[in-house]
Image (cartoon, coloured by chain):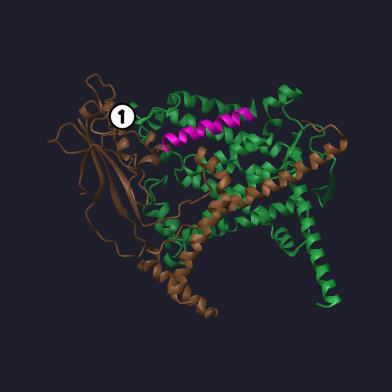
């Protein structure tokens, strides 16, 4: 109902102003809690050697500042405070969770957090028959092999095939099946398509370079019959929702 | 407790209460500010164009069905149930919404529709939804709430008979866009703690990132070795710049409020931190766009940069470029609020 008297209107307007200011303050607090990169630390985590070494280093630094806290006590504090933070954060951010879930958003911003010298390089290959050697069709930074380079290097498609910290992602088999279909449509002479990830290691100048044979992981092979029907139509995967392709061991 | 002690304590409590009340009142005034819609309108145009470009790229590469159809229909995703609408229809709604958002036609509806469809697309194949998409979805919500269509838009043309309007809109959506941008940089910076981003591995992160075959635009396998010292400096500069982003909020506060009180505000003003941050940000993103194949990431971030500036900054720029309408470059009128202008910096207090 709209306020009718001037006094009621003034009070309503003032309440709206204060309400908005309170809401915006609450949003800022929620954003802070949601953005803080504090992951839950478990009891098992603090016993890992690298974490233990890090805690010991912090303990030594604290001691140099006159704060005596041994490694065990510091590890216990870490577990306790991380759990407390998680609990508070869950309560504080609860009002925004439904929105974040509905829009698949969050506030944890991690941009190129790992810059490891160990990287991946994808190879896409094809061959007309099993007895013939594989022909490289696409390889990043290889100007002679650029089949499907445009769609493959489009950021959304790369998000599907580019391995994460723990290796290839869940939709990788679906990606390989799609690549195979596109390759077979473009190259009627090919009967098999193989996609695999080469492990590459970069050394800093002056560091010793270990010479070794290329090492491949996530090797998947699809034949023409597996992905295309007799008239070139999309063949619905058999043996599971995706059809994982013929998985080969790492070479 | 003695009578004097009780009086002192009472005075102290009273002074704290007054201080809190004053701060709260200042915060309420800050949240209630209104300003010309120019800055958010520019963000709206940039965000709409960036999203439309990205969706157009998906269509040009012929990957719309592959990305957003369900697994049984040839899509890459793991979702077995068909999406609520066919992928091409979802794509078309998203593209049209992005274009109408950029044009400022049915602006709120366009922003809301794009936010909804963008979210549906993200749920079909989350791996194809990158960090920049999340950031743009956050921005879309604020644009939908901001009145970004009040100027530089078809809505303004339809409503007021002119594309450029002096209509005032709430300033808080722009402030939240700034907080969002600062939050992205600051927390991303603090998460860069792997050895290559620190002195442990000699600030070598950019050396490895720029050699990544999946991301680097050029194969610089040997050329990068000659630039290693420069790349170490650039890595350190990236971390420092990102981690300093919290100061951006202070710098914006100093600019927006015209306040000269407090040593931190004086230092941030004298150091020209705001200008440095924006310059480094633009150089950083343009360098990324050249050196790395990150799609719309650099442009999506830069699309939010107009929010960092006050509307009058754009008006003065337009005036300086000689392309302004008569009377448009005047100091903004904060509708019934007393406007205090300190050394050219307009600050509104109620």
* A62 part of magenta stretch: no
In this view, the residue in front, A171 or A127, is A171
The reply, left or right, for residue B313 in relation to residue B247 is: right
> Numbered disc 1: what chain?
A
Query: How far across and down, in percent of the image, does residue A214 sit?
Result: 24, 51
The reply, left or right, for residue A79 in relation to residue B261 is: left
Query: How far across and down, in percent of the image, does residue A108 sit?
Result: 51, 50
Task: Please say whether residue B299 is visible from this viewpoint.
Answer: no
Label 1 packing within 10 angstroms: few (<14), some (14-19), many (20+): some
The reply, left or right, for residue A229 in relation to residue A16 is: left
Residue at 35 percent across and 44 percent down: it is A169
Residue under pointer 1: A182
Query: Which residues, given as a range, are shown in magenta?
Result: B108-125
List the single residue furthest toward the front: B1
| Quarter of the figure with residue B138 | top right
In this view, the residue in front, B165 or B253, is B253
Residue at 24 percent across and 19 percent down: it is A231
In this view, the residue in front, B161 or B123, is B123
* Image quadrant containing the N terminus of chain B: bottom right
- Chain that appears brown: A
Query: How far across and down, in percent of the image, does residue B23 sit?
Result: 77, 56
The colour applied to the residues of chain B in this rendering is green
Query: How far across and down, in percent of the image, does residue A43 sit?
Result: 40, 64
Q: Is residue A68 above or below residue B92?
A: below
For the residue labelled by badge 1, is the local secondary structure a helix, a strand or a loop?
Answer: helix
């Amino acid at each position: 109902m709209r306020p009718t008297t001037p006094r009621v209107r003034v009070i309503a307007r003032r309440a709206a102003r204060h309400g908005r200011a309170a809401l915006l303050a609450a949003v800022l607090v929620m954003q802070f809690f949601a953005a803080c990169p504090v992951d839950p630390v478990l009891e098992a985590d603090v016993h890992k050697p690298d974490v233990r070494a890090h805690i010991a280093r912090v303990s030594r630094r604290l001691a140099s500042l006159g704060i005596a806290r041994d490694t065990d006590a510091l590890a216990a504090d870490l577990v306790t405070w991380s759990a407390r933070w998680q609990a508070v954060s869950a309560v504080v951010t609860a009002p925004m969770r439904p929105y974040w879930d509905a829009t698949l958003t969050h506030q944890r911003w991690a941009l190129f957090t790992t810059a490891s010298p160990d990287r991946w390089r994808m190879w896409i290959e094809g061959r007309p028959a099993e007895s013939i050697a594989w022909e490289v069709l696409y390889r990043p930074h290889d100007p002679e092999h650029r089949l499907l380079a445009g769609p493959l290097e489009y950021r959304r498609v790369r998000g599907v095939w580019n391995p994460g910290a723990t290796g290839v992602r869940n939709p990788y088999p679906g990606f390989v099946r799609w690549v195979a279909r596109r390759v077979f449509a473009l190259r009627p002479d090919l009967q098999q398509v193989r996609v695999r990830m080469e492990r590459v290691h970069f050394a800093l100048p002056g560091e010793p370079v270990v010479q070794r044979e290329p090492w491949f992981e996530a090797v998947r092979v699809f034949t023409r019959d597996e992905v295309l029907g007799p008239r070139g139509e999309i063949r619905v995967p058999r043996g599971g929702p995706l059809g994982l392709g013929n998985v080969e061991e790492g070479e | 407790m003695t009578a004097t002690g009780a009086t002192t304590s009472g005075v102290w409590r009273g002074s704290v209460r007054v201080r809190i009340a004053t701060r709260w009142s200042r915060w309420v005034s800050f949240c209630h500010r209104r300003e010309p819609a120019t800055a958010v309108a520019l963000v709206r145009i940039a965000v709409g164009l960036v999203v439309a470009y990205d969706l157009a790229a998906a269509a040009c590469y012929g990957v719309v069905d592959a990305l957003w159809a369900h697994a049984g229909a040839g899509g890459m995703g793991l979702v077995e149930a068909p999406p609520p609408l066919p992928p091409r229809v979802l794509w078309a709604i998203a593209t049209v919404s992005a274009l109408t958002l950029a044009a400022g036609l049915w602006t709120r509806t366009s922003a809301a529709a794009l936010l909804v469809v963008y979210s549906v697309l993200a749920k079909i194949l989350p791996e194809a939804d990158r960090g920049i998409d999340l950031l743009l979805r956050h921005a879309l919500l604020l644009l939908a709430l901001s009145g970004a269509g009040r100027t530089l838009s078809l809505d303004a043309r339809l409503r007021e008979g002119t594309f450029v309007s002096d209509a005032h809109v709430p300033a808080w959506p722009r402030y939240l866009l700034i907080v969002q941008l600062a939050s992205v940089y600051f927390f991303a910076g603090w998460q860069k703690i792997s050895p290559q981003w620190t002195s442990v591995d000699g600030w070598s992160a950019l050396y490895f990132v720029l050699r990544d075959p999946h991301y680097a635009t050029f194969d610089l396998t040997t050329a990068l070795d000659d630039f290693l010292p420069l790349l170490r400096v650039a890595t350190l500069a990236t971390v420092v710049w990102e981690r300093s982003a919290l100061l951006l909020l202070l710098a914006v506060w100093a600019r927006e409020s015209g306040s000269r009180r407090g040593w931190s505000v004086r230092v941030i003003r004298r150091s020209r931190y705001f200008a440095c941050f924006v310059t480094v940000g633009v150089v950083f993103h343009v360098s990324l766009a050249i050196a790395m194949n990150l799609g719309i990431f650099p442009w999506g971030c830069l699309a939010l940069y107009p929010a960092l500036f006050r509307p009058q900054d754009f008006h003065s720029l337009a005036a300086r470029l000689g392309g302004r309408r008569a009377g448009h470059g005047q100091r903004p009128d904060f509708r019934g609020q007393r406007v205090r202008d300190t050394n050219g910096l307009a600050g509104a207090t109620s």
